Amino acid sequence: MYFLTGCIGITVTFHRYLAHHSYESPKWFQIFGSICGSLGGTGSPIGWRGVHIEHHKYSDHQGDPHSPVTRGWRLFLTSYPFNLNKFAIRNMITDPFQRFMHEYYILILLLWGILLLSISVNVFLFAFIVPIAIQITFSNISNYYNHHYHWGCYRTHQTNDESYNSTWLGLLTWGEGLGHNKHHAEPWNPNYGGNRWWEIDPSFWIIQLVRTDK
């Protein structure tokens, strides 16, 4: 389930397609990925994009909504802001499907949980609680670790922020933590690996299978 919510949903669809439009994909995949990402428990597609655009705009400076450099330990105790930048999400709020997913996000998540619980407690635990817990935990670890130098971190590009790459974190986050510094230098590039021979980006493999702009 974490593959669907974390890889297909958050990484491939929310981040690399909806937030950065770094590749083209069929409409069915955009819808499928948006649903998967929403079930990951970190926000609606519109909300996720709005926050992430602000993150890149103010990366590690005042105004960045999820940078440990400016927010420190408070990052783990606060949620995403409710007031989204309408300009940042202008191309999504006109999409009926995305508006529906945003307006009824909490209800959709609750109904999904109730459906799984009606099947069995174990299904609810391993298809709902565990994937959401993993996604939130790894997202927070990635936000912190990729914005501070730690053992094993490195930079491949000069950027005006504190972004770092981490090979081991990339393995846990479907490639997200792998090329964080590269991503901040080249947000239009869907491939977060490629600078070192050991950089493996599983999410880019998925993108290569579904993209229509090859």
Image (spheres, rainbow, N blue to C red):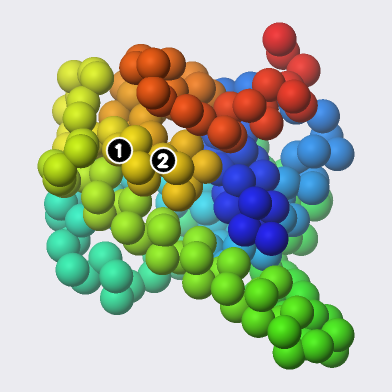
Residue extending farthest top: 214
Tell whether 208 sits left or right of 32. left
Residue 131 visible in this rendered orientation of the protein:
yes
Disc 2 crowd, CA 10 A, few/some/many (<14, 14-19, 20+): many
| Labels 1 and 2 touching (C-beta < 8 A) | yes
| Position in image of residue 41 (x %, y %) | 58, 67
Q: Residue at x 68, y 21 (%)?
A: 208
User: Can you say whether 129 is above or below 41 in the image?
Assistant: below
The amino acid sitting under disc 2 is Gly
Q: Which residue is mark 2?
A: 170
Residue extending farthest front: 198
The amino acid sitting under disc 1 is Ser
Name the one closer to the observer, 26 or 172.
172
Question: SS at mark 1?
Answer: strand
Q: Which label number is shown at residue 2? A: none
| Position in image of residue 143 (x %, y %) | 31, 52
Q: Residue at x 76, y 60 (%)?
A: 100
Q: Residue at x 45, y 42 (%)?
A: 171
User: Can you say whether 85 is above or below 178 in the image?
Assistant: below
| Position in image of residue 156 (x %, y %) | 24, 19
Name the one closer to the observer, 47 or 199.
199
Tell whether 194 sits left or right of 30. left
Q: Which label number is shown at residue 166? A: 1
Tell whether 123 sits left or right of 151. right
